[in-house]
Image (cartoon, coloured by chain):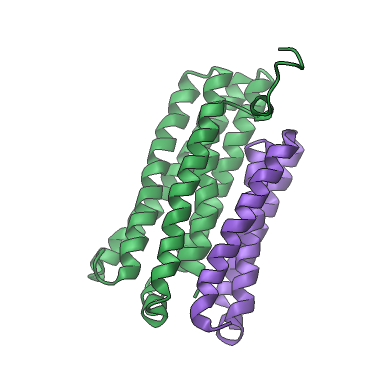
Chain colours: A purple, B green
């Protein structure tokens, strides 16, 4: 892993965190909770992928990275469905 | 190792046992988050009211602190692999200090809840809040000690294992943060 890619990873992670936090402070949540939840979970999913790939080095093992991606996607989708269930969406 | 004796497990970066630990911890916290959201289905209004007592700004700040700490941990391994031991040690200490800052903010958050009379059995939301974030904070505390230990005993393998543990702590938090603090 090059140092440059670590800096890019950190910058992306911070931007994604700011994005999800600003969304939670905005009025979007009151109007479209389902859409806001989808965006927040998608940002969390992307952050987890960056940590697995860049910080934990799974980019060097593409087959394992795909496996972790599938499992992570499944967990994030399940969490999203459980959140959306009471909204009746 | 010849190509015939290579297995898929050899492709994993770092120590296999660390990956077993990472997957185990992800399963434990993943199960906790799934149960949390399942219980929320029975009382979404009560959960939303309880969640409003949390400090989202402090949690977002803590997320950025922990992610930056993860960056210093990854940088430390990179520097140590390039034989820059001094730089690696400084990076590990920076990572540990940011971990300690995370714990400080988390401690202040818990103290603020206690001052408001909010304890673990105030509402089912707080059962999960204290259990999940408290268990995660215990991992952060263990990680800070590990980072300082490997800054002292700075063999590449030691740094690889300690930083993998630290990234696992990061990984758990990026899933815990939106579910506990942001999904309103």
Where does residue B147 sit, x and y in percent of width and height?
A: 47, 31
Q: Nearer the viewer, residue B84 or A42?
A: A42
* Res B57 seen here: no
Question: In the drawing, does residue B107 fall left or right of residue B161?
Answer: left
Tell me: residue B101, above or below residue B164.
below
Tell me: residue B23, above or below residue A24.
above
Where does residue B36 sit, x and y in percent of width and height?
A: 41, 64
Where does residue B26 sit, x and y in percent of width and height?
A: 50, 47
Tell me: residue B20, above or below residue B55.
above
Total marks placed:
0
Where does residue B81 sit, x and y in percent of width and height?
A: 66, 21
* Res B111 seen here: yes
Q: In the rendered view of the protein, which quadrant contains the N terminus of chain B?
A: top right
Residue placed farthest to the top in the image?
B1
Q: Nearer the viewer, residue B86 or B50?
A: B50
Q: Residue at x 65, y 63 (%)?
A: A42
């Amino acid at each position: 892993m090059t140092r440059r890619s670590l800096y890019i990873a950190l910058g992306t992670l911070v931007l994604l965190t700011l994005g999800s936090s600003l969304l939670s402070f905005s009025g979007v949540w009151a109007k479209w909770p389902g859409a806001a939840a989808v965006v927040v979970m998608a940002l969390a999913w992307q952050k987890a992928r960056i940590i697995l790939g860049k910080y934990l080095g799974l980019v060097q093992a593409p087959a394992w990275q795909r496996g972790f991606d599938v499992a992570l996607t499944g967990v994030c989708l399940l969490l999203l469905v459980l959140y959306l269930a009471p909204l009746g969406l | 190792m010849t190509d015939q004796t290579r297995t898929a497990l050899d492709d994993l970066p770092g120590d296999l046992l660390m990956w077993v630990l990472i997957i185990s911890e992800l399963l434990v916290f993943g199960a906790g988050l799934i149960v949390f959201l399942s219980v929320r289905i029975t009382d979404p209004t009560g959960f939303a009211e309880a969640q409003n007592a949390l400090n989202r700004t402090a949690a977002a700040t803590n997320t950025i602190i922990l992610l930056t700490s993860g960056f210093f941990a990854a940088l430390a391994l990179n520097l140590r692999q390039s034989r820059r031991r001094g730089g690696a040690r400084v990076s590990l200490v920076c990572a540990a200090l940011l971990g300690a800052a995370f714990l400080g903010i988390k401690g202040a958050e818990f103290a603020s809840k206690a001052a408001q009379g909010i304890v673990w059995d105030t509402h089912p939301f707080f059962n999960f809040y204290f259990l999940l974030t408290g268990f995660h904070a215990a991992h952060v505390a263990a990680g800070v000690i590990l980072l300082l230990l490997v800054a002292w005993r700075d063999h590449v393998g030691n740094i690889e294992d300690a930083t993998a543990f630290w990234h696992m702590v990061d990984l758990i938090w990026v899933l815990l943060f939106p579910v506990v603090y942001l999904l309103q």
